[in-house]
Image: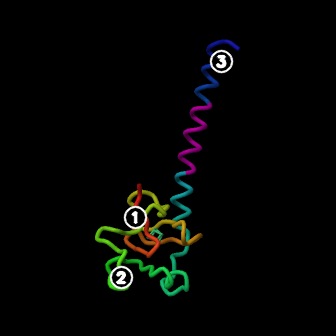
């Protein structure tokens, strides 16, 4: 294969890879927007003390909650940076609020 042909294939592969990564990111964001929100009254949410707004959590009942903690900066949050809602590794198939919190909170490394 001559050099110009080889370079053409290399560039084509790069373009395909870049488009695929962009498409995956777009799908992830769309997917998060389409997911139903966690029901705060569901047994799992109640057992983990999840609320859509961390400010509404009873700190006496959940002493692990520290100032500044919320889903948006939890290691398990799967939403895009700056998103208001996103997936969570604990609540499969459901969206949690970026400003929410639950007792499984783990800080991002
Ligand atoms: Fe929010 Fe993290 Fe709890 Fe999921 S595990 S609900 S992202 S605090």
Mark 1, ligand 1, within 8 Å: the answer is: yes
What's the CA distance linking mark 3 and mark 2? 62 Å
Q: Nearer the viewer, mark 1 or mark 2?
A: 2
Q: Would you name the residue on which mark 1 appears?
A: 72
Which label sits on residue 57? 2
Mark 1 vs 3: CB contact within 8 A: no
What's the CA distance linking mark 1 and mark 3? 46 Å
Residue 29 located left or right of residue 52: right
**Callout 3 secondary element:** helix
Query: Could you say where residue 53 lies in the image, as x and y percent from the top left?
Result: 37, 77
Q: On the rendered image, what quadrant is the C terminus found in?
A: bottom left
Residue at 35% x, 74% y is 65
Residue at 51% x, 59% y is 29
Query: Could you say where residue 77 lies in the image, as x and y percent from the top left?
Result: 47, 63
**Callout 2 secondary element:** loop
Q: Would you name the residue on which mark 3 appears?
A: 5
- Start and end of the magenta stretch? 13-24
Disc on the earlier residue, 1 or 3: 3
Q: On the rendered image, what quadrant is the N terminus found in?
A: top right
């Amino acid at each position: 294969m001559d050099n110009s042909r080889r370079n053409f294939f290399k560039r084509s592969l790069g373009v395909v890879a870049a488009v695929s990564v962009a498409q995956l990111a777009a799908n992830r964001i769309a997917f998060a927007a389409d997911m139903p929100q966690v029901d705060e009254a569901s047994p799992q949410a109640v057992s983990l003390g999840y609320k859509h707004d961390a400010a509404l959590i009873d700190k006496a009942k959940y002493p692990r909650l520290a100032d500044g903690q919320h889903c948006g900066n939890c290691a398990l949050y799967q939403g895009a940076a700056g998103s208001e809602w996103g997936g969570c590794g604990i609540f499969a198939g459901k969206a949690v609020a970026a400003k929410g919190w639950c007792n499984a909170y783990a800080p991002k490394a």
